[in-house]
Image (tube, rainbow, N blue to C red):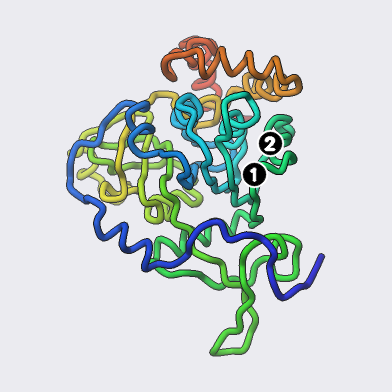
Amino acid sequence: MLNEDRAHGPLLTNPDPEVARQFFRSKPKQLIDKVMSVPEAISRFVHDGDYLASGGFGADRIATALLHEIVRQRKQNLGFAGHTATHDFQILAAGNNTGRGQLLKKVDAAYIVGLEARGLSPHARRVVESGQVELCEWTNYALAIRFQAASMGVSFLPTRSVAGTDTFRYGAGRKIICPFTGAEYVAIPALWPDVAIIHVHEADCFGNARIRGTSVADFTLPRAAKHVILSCERLISNDEIRRDPTSTDIPFFCVDAVCEVPFGSYPGNMPYEYYSDEDHLKQWLAVEEDAAAHLAFLDKYIFGVKDFAEYLELCGGHARLAELRQQELEPHL
């Protein structure tokens, strides 16, 4: 562990709240129908050079359908917040070093490359080790604090975290002194993503959304992002939202697009809906060992399909999805 007073990592985004306020001041907040297709949502709200944040945590409740479309539309030079990014980072890394340009250009990294107990993504590792992606290191907590600061409209929040560690050294925090106690803290800068993609259980046509189970940073992320694209397991009526307003985790005025995508987190786990497809995730990891096999896999499962429904059919269709739903709903002994 190194105990240095200054960080050496690059600050990849502007933490100035006044700049962010200029955008949010002009963002439309009408109660309008925002339902659209996945291709339309990605085309309208994700642009080359944007900074992207992915909701969920690990392989739980990731917006797989939206991630596939970002790769399929060959978006370029994106920034990315790697907040426990497992299969979502693996998907985005498929846009690098595969003969289709450079999707990822800069990454605020807390947890990337690894798919937790499943192992490391060979291709994501190659992308990071190649040096083509600029990295700044954080902890998961620190990245969550960055969204929290942005949602509050302040340029930073103080923490006791990371000081005296290599994570601090390769990050972009700053040591400060508390004016009240003289104690030392680390100032964690705010992060306003250009666009956040989040998969939820239910949403109405206006963008009011419900999340069941652990939300992690997905309460503050949509309140920090300039644009928010939601994919949902199912659309519900606004009357249903109003019958239980305290269950609304994401309010409509944060949201720009709503896409109904049943099983939209597959092969990830969707709490209370379906279990992760561990066989398919193992297949991803295995094919990445060989560059040619990886390209053939991407051509079959991402570039060679017209939409996410066709991808699901290739992965076993209704029968496989029913198995995964049963696994999630069964009591685990």
Would residue 73 appear left or right of 240 to someone viewing this image? right
User: What residue lies at 30% left-to-right and 58% top-to-bottom?
Assistant: 24
Residue 155 sits above or below residue 126 on the image: below
Would residue 185 appear left or right of 306 to someone viewing this image? right
Residue 42 visible in image: yes
**Which is more toward the observer, 250 or 327?**
250
User: To which residue does mark 2 refer?
Assistant: 127
Which quadrant holds the C terminus? Answer: top right
Would residue 116 appear left or right of 46 to someone viewing this image? right
Which quadrant holds the N terminus? Answer: bottom right
User: To which residue does mark 1 refer?
Assistant: 133
Residue 289 picture location, percent across and down: 76, 23
Q: Quadrant of residue 19 in the image? A: bottom left
Mark sitting earlier along the chain (1/2): 2
Residue 264 picture location, percent across and down: 44, 27
Count every numbered label the image shows and give the total: 2
Residue 315 sits above or below residue 13 on the image: above
Residue 140 picture location, percent across and down: 61, 54
Identify the disc placed on residue 289.
Answer: none
Q: Disc 2 residue type?
A: Val
User: What residue lies at 39% left-to-right and 24% top-to-bottom?
Assistant: 262
**Which is more toward the observer, 21 or 162?**
21
